[in-house]
Image (cartoon, grey):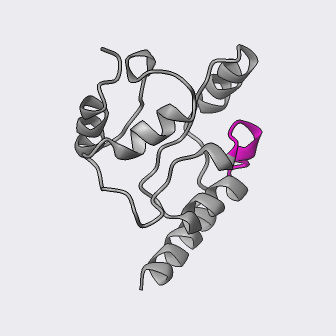
Amino acid sequence: MILKKESIYQKLCRDEKLKLAPGVVTFLDFLKERVIPFNIATASGKENLDFFFEYLNLSKWFNKKNVSFNDGNVKSKPDPELFYSAISRLGIQPSETLIFEDSISEIKSAENAGVGK
C-alpha cells in the first residue's frame, strides 16, 4: 500500500510539473559556490528520495549518499534523529546549523536537535 501511495504521489508531481520553489536553485547554487555545507534530512523513504533526486536533478547540489532519510529504522519527527544524522554527515555542530522546515512537528524536531543555539 505504501508503494502504491508513493506511485500515485509521484505521478501527481509529474502531472502537475512540480518544481523547486522560487529562489531555491539560486540559494543552493550560492551555498555550493561558497562551499557552505548543506544537506537533506527527510522522513521520506528511499523510493521518494530516488524519485526526487532524478525528477528535480538534486545531484547537482547534493550527494545522495550523505542524505539522511527514513530507512525504516529511524524515529519519526519530532525526534531529532534524522537531523542529527544529516548534521553529523556535514561535520558540524547542531549549534552551527540552520534548518528550513514546513510543519510544526518538523520545527519541533529542529528545536529538539538544538540547532542555531
- The image shows residue 106, relative to residue 8, as above or below, that is above
Question: What secondary structure is the magenta-colored segment mainly?
Answer: loop
Q: Is residue 5 left or right of residue 33?
A: left
- The image shows residue 38, relative to residue 36, as above or below, that is below
Q: Is residue 40 left or right of residue 81?
A: right
Q: Residue at x 31, y 56 (%)?
A: 75
Q: Residue at x 31, y 41 (%)?
A: 80
The image quarter in which residue 5 lies: bottom left
- The image shows residue 112, relative to residue 42, as above or below, that is above
Quadrant for the N terminus in the image:
bottom left
- The image shows residue 42, relative to residue 113, as above or below, that is below
Taking depth in this image into account, of 11 and 6 the one nearest to the observer is: 6
62 falls in the magenta region: yes
Q: Is residue 51 visible?
A: yes
Q: Is residue 17 visible?
A: no
Q: Residue at x 58, y 46 (%)?
A: 67
97 falls in the magenta region: no
Q: Residue 6, position in %: x, y?
A: 49, 73
Taking depth in this image into account, of 48 and 23 the one nearest to the observer is: 48
Q: How many marks?
A: 0
Residue stretch in magenta? 56-63
Q: Residue 55, position in %: x, y?
A: 69, 57
Q: Residue 115, position in %: x, y?
A: 34, 23
The image quarter in which residue 73 lies: bottom left
Quadrant for the C terminus in the image:
top left
Q: Residue at x 68, y 50 (%)?
A: 56
Q: Is residue 73 left or right of residue 79?
A: right
Q: Is residue 52 left or right of residue 110?
A: right
The image quarter in which residue 113 lies: top left
